[in-house]
Structures are given as structure tokens and as C-alpha cells.
């Protein structure tokens, strides 16, 4: 086995709950004890050669092939940082793309509806041209299209978090200008979809809620612009239950909605993994679920 490696000394300052430091140690141990490879500067970083070989991704179901198709060139945050969430949508959703019946069962359970079929699963998806929707760089970490038994079509837009917390903004960015402009597309879409309590709209641009709001608005924009194609949209945020920031933010965000009929659903990793086990079709998928739990659920001790 390899050395666990250095841990970042300021993790407990960044996240006083202790989850960030525990997750970094979890990834460091997985690299050292399971992958049995050396680390870069900190224990949660793969060396470029190992990252380039796909060790940050599940080895089956064509996961790394999907990564390389989308990103043919090495990127350190995606390929080698085991702690950041960029790689996780590939590990979660590419295997489900290989068995859309399995995927259908999972989301039928979450949404409590009758999905007939899953039509499409994409990683890091944004509709084009962006000027028709939010006119920015907002995209879904994962995007799913489905058809219900009553022949209507729906979409699911998913944001995946691991240890991340609030999302800071650059003071001189286009996004900053847009969220401060009451005539921007953000507020136009917010009013058009009619989901938010008027007294809470001013809170949505804050660091805590802005990214959840933007992703939700992107899906609502698709419903507005492509109303002939889609009748339903659900925004989901996936995060571990010990990420107390998103546990709190999700509850507060839902309280800002006038109604929540599958409009926004927070999903913990733990709940998602239990659903995967509930509908698991075979041993190949059982091995994948075991990997997900070993990789992302904080072990005791």
C-alpha cells in the first residue's frame, strides 16, 4: 500500500463541520489502499500519469471512454482531483445510460410517476443556442429526457455536489451584471415560470442559492422555449447527507417555492445508492454500487 499523503491544513477552516477534511482523507485512503498508487501534492490528487489512465473513474460500463470522448485532453481537476465533483456525474450516470430500464426504475421511484422510457442521458449538457435560454454558460451536470405512459415528455436537470458549498462570484463577470439587473433573463424567466414567492426573489442571487436557482431556471427556460417538446421539468441536486451546507440550502430553497410538484428535489448520495440497490439488475451493477459506496461514503475510523 502507498502513503495516504498530506492533507490540506485549512480544510477545517473552510468547512467547520469537518466533512471536507473527512472526505479528503476518504479519497486519499482510496487512492493509497485500493488504487495503490502514489499521490501528487496532497493525498486526494492522482499523479498525471495515473489520472490520464482513468483511475478517477469507474473501470466498467465505458465510463472512462465517455470521459475521453468529451474531454480528449488531460485536465487535472477532472482526471486527477479525486475530491472535486467534476468526475462524479460520469461515475453516477454513464452506467445508467447502459441500462435505461434500470435508470427508469430509479427515477420512477424518485418522481412517483409512470415513466415509460428513458430517451436520453447526457453529461454536462446545455441547450443551444444559449441566447434562447439563459444566455450564459449554465449547464446541467447530468441531463435526462423521458417519456411517460401518457405519452408526455419530461426532462430532469441534475447538479452533483460532493464537498462544495456556496458558489462565489466574480465582481466584474457577466453573471454579476446579470443578477444585479432586474431586466435580465434570470428575472424574466423567474417571473415567467411563476414558481417563486415574490418576497424571496431577492435572496436567490446570494452565494448560497444562485447556482441552484440558475440550474432550475435553465430547465424552466427549456419548458418555455421548447413547450411543444417537453411538458415536465425537475431540477435535482445530489449531495452526501454529511454536506450540511446543501442539506440546509435545499430546505431553504424549497421554502421559496410557491409549489413543489416535482419542481425541485434534493437527493442524498445515500438515498440514491439505496435506490440503486433496490432495483439492481445484476452482479455487474452490484459491483458498481459497491464501488460508489466505498468511494464516496465516509467510512468510520
Image (cartoon, rainbow, N blue to C red):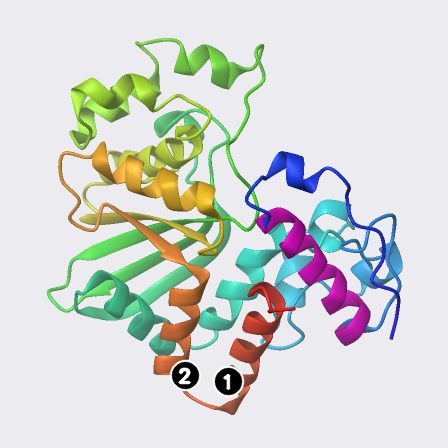
Residue 230 seen in this snapshot: no
Residue 80 lies in what quarter of the image?
Answer: bottom right
Residue depicted at 88% across the width and 65% down the height: 3
Q: Are marks 1 and 2 in contact (CB under 8 Å)?
A: yes
Residue depicted at 49% across the width and 14% down the height: 176
Which residue is more in the foreground, 241 or 46? 241
Q: Which residue is mark 1?
A: 286
Residue depicted at 54% across the width and 87% down the height: 284
Q: Which residue is mark 2?
A: 280
Instruction: State which quarter of the image contains the N terminus.
Output: bottom right
**Residues rendered magenta in the picture:** 19-34
Circle 1 — which element?
helix
Residue 202 lies in what quarter of the image?
Answer: top left
In the image, residue 228 lies at what x, y percent?
19, 44
Q: CA distance from mark 1 to mark 2?
A: 6 Å
Residue 81 lies in the magenta stretch: no
Residue 203 seen in this snapshot: yes
Which residue is more in the foreground, 28 or 135? 28
Residue depicted at 18% across the width and 65% down the height: 112
Which residue is more in the foreground, 260 or 8? 8
Amino acid at each position: 500500500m502507498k502513503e495516504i499523503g498530506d492533507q490540506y491544513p485549512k480544510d477545517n477552516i473552510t468547512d467547520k463541520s469537518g466533512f471536507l477534511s473527512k472526505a479528503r482523507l476518504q479519497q486519499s485512503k482510496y487512492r493509497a489502499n485500493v488504487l495503490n498508487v502514489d499521490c501528487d501534492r496532497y493525498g486526494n490528487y492522482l499523479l498525471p500519469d495515473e489520472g490520464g489512465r482513468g483511475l478517477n473513474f469507474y473501470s466498467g460500463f465505458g465510463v472512462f471512454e465517455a470521459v475521453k470522448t468529451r474531454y480528449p485532453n488531460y485536465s487535472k481537476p477532472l482526471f486527477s482531483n479525486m475530491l472535486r465533483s467534476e468526475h462524479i456525474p460520469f461515475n453516477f450516470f454513464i452506467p445508467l445510460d447502459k441500462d435505461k430500464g434500470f435508470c427508469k426504475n430509479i427515477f420512477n421511484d424518485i418522481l412517483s410517476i409512470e415513466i415509460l422510457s428513458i430517451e436520453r442521458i447526457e453529461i454536462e449538457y446545455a441547450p443551444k443556442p444559449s441566447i434562447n435560454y439563459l444566455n450564459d454558460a449554465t449547464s446541467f451536470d447530468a441531463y435526462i429526457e423521458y417519456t411517460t405512459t401518457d405519452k408526455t415528455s419530461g426532462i430532469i436537470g441534475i447538479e452533483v455536489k460532493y464537498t462544495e458549498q456556496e458558489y462565489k462570484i466574480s465582481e466584474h463577470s457577466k453573471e454579476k451584471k446579470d443578477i444585479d439587473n432586474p431586466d435580465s433573463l434570470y428575472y424574466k424567466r423567474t417571473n415567467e415560470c411563476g414558481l417563486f414567492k415574490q418576497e424571496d426573489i431577492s435572496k436567490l442571487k446570494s452565494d448560497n442559492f444562485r447556482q441552484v436557482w440558475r440550474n432550475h431556471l435553465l430547465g424552466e427556460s427549456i419548458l418555455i422555449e421548447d413547450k411543444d417538446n417537453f411538458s415536465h421539468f425537475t431540477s435535482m441536486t445530489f449531495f452526501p447527507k454529511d454536506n450540511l451546507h446543501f442539506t440546509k440550502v435545499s430546505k431553504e430553497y424549497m421554502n421559496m417555492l410557491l409549489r413543489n410538484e416535482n419542481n425541485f428535489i434534493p437527493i442524498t448520495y445515500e438515498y440514491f445508492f439505496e435506490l440503486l440497490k433496490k432495483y439492481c439488475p445484476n452482479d455487474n451493477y452490484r459491483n458498481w454500487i459497491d464501488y460508489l459506496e466505498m468511494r464516496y461514503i465516509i467510512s468510520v475510523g
